[in-house]
Image (cartoon, grey):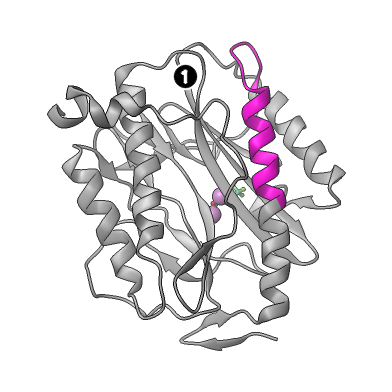
């Protein structure tokens, strides 16, 4: 069994094996989502696909009925920051959409998301999506025993703000395991050297939400959908990670490329990335 220090659970070998299993499944479902996305489908089509694929694996979709959330996946388009509710909205050419998949299997949670390009993206869509993608990579790169939780947010904030983007403050990453959301809270902005020390056996998510405009968000009347206050585009990527004895293991790493969310190399090479 795991034990807790500073209220953050340390997972033992058996729990880590379970986490590997559920996280691999969630990553596989997300990969399949990439293959079904195209202009003209609805977010409800994505919901149905994720629900059925999850159940087919013998897992359960964690979002369904979580604190009253009505669907099995979160679908967040364009200015929607997170927690978008699937429904009749049709994906349009040029949209960006984050699909956030969380499975429960044998009592453990695996949580992962990506932002996908629907058709050909605008330069703004590429900008915010590639900054979010890189932000997650930089956050993950901070994870090792002895590092501080604040190092993750500091690395992300430093990069994202240098790219003239902002980091959402009202939503954070989280410890994960038997609970969907456990301690610690993983802020995506912060200060180097601050926060608890990371220890082997900790499992948590890193899930930076990056806005093209300001970081402020507001929640719509459905009490879930969070949008940018200024209507600017927002993108997010999420992995569940394990602190190992030597560094980090990305539990929701994908086997191959993610169709519909391929890296736009022009972004880092081209003038726009440097200029903005
Ligand atoms: N998957 C989200 C996260 O990364 C949480 C969604 S909660 C829900 O933490 F209720 F909206 F599903
Ligand atoms: Co999460
Ligand atoms: Co998630």
The spot of residue 6 in percent (x, y) is 46, 86
Extreme residue in the left direction:
275
Instruction: Point out residue 137 in the picture as x, y percentages from the top left corner.
Output: 39, 50
Quadrant for residue 206, please give it: bottom left
Q: Is residue 271 magenta?
A: no
* Main SS class of the magenta portion in the image: helix
x and y percent of residue 7 in the render?
50, 83
SS at circle 1: loop
Q: Residue at x 56, y 80 (%)?
A: 9
Q: Position of residue 171 (x, y in %)?
A: 42, 53
Q: State the residue at coordinates (35%, 16%).
A: 122
Q: Does the stretch in magenta take in 28?
A: yes
User: What is the quadrant of residue 186 in the picture?
Assistant: bottom left
Q: Which residues are magenta?
A: 25-42
Residue 215 seen in the figure = no
Read off the residue under disc 1.
95
Q: Quadrant of the N terminus?
A: bottom right
Tell me the residue at 36%/34% (across/down): 130
Q: Nearer the viewer, residue 200 or 192?
A: 200
Total marks placed = 1
Residue at position x 81%, y 52% from top?
59
10 Å crowding of disc 1: few (<14), some (14-19), many (20+): some
Q: Nearer the viewer, residue 155 or 104?
A: 155
């Amino acid at each position: 069994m795991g034990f807790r220090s500073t209220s953050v659970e340390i997972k033992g070998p058996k729990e880590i094996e379970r986490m590997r299993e559920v996280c691999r499944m969630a990553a596989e479902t997300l990969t399949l989502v990439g293959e079904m996305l195209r202009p003209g489908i609805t977010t409800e089509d994505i919901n149905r696909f994720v629900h059925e694929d999850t159940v087919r694996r013998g897992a359960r979709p964690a979002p369904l009925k979580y604190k009253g959330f009505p669907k099995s996946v979160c679908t967040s388009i364009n200015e929607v920051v997170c927690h978008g509710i699937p429904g009749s909205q049709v994906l349009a050419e040029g949209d960006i959409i984050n699909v956030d998949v969380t499975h429960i299997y044998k009592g453990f949670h695996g949580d992962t998301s990506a932002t996908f390009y629907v058709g050909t993206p605008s330069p703004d869509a590429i900008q915010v999506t590639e900054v979010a993608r890189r932000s997650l990579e930089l956050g993950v790169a901070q994870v090792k025993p002895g590092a501080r939780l604040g190092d993750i947010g500091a690395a992300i904030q430093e990069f994202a703000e240098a790219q003239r983007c902002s980091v959402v403050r009202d939503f954070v990453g989280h410890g994960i395991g038997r609970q969907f959301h456990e301690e610690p809270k993983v802020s995506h902005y912060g200060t180097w050297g601050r926060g608890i020390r990371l220890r082997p056996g900790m499992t948590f998510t890193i899930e930076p939400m990056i806005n093209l405009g300001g970081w402020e968000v507001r929640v719509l009347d459905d009490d879930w959908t969070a949008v940018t206050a200024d209507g600017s585009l927002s993108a997010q990527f999420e992995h569940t990670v394990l602190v190992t004895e030597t560094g980090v293991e990305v539990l929701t790493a994908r086997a191959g490329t993610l169709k519909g969310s391929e890296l736009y190399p022009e972004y880092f090479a081209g003038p726009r990335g440097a200029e903005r």
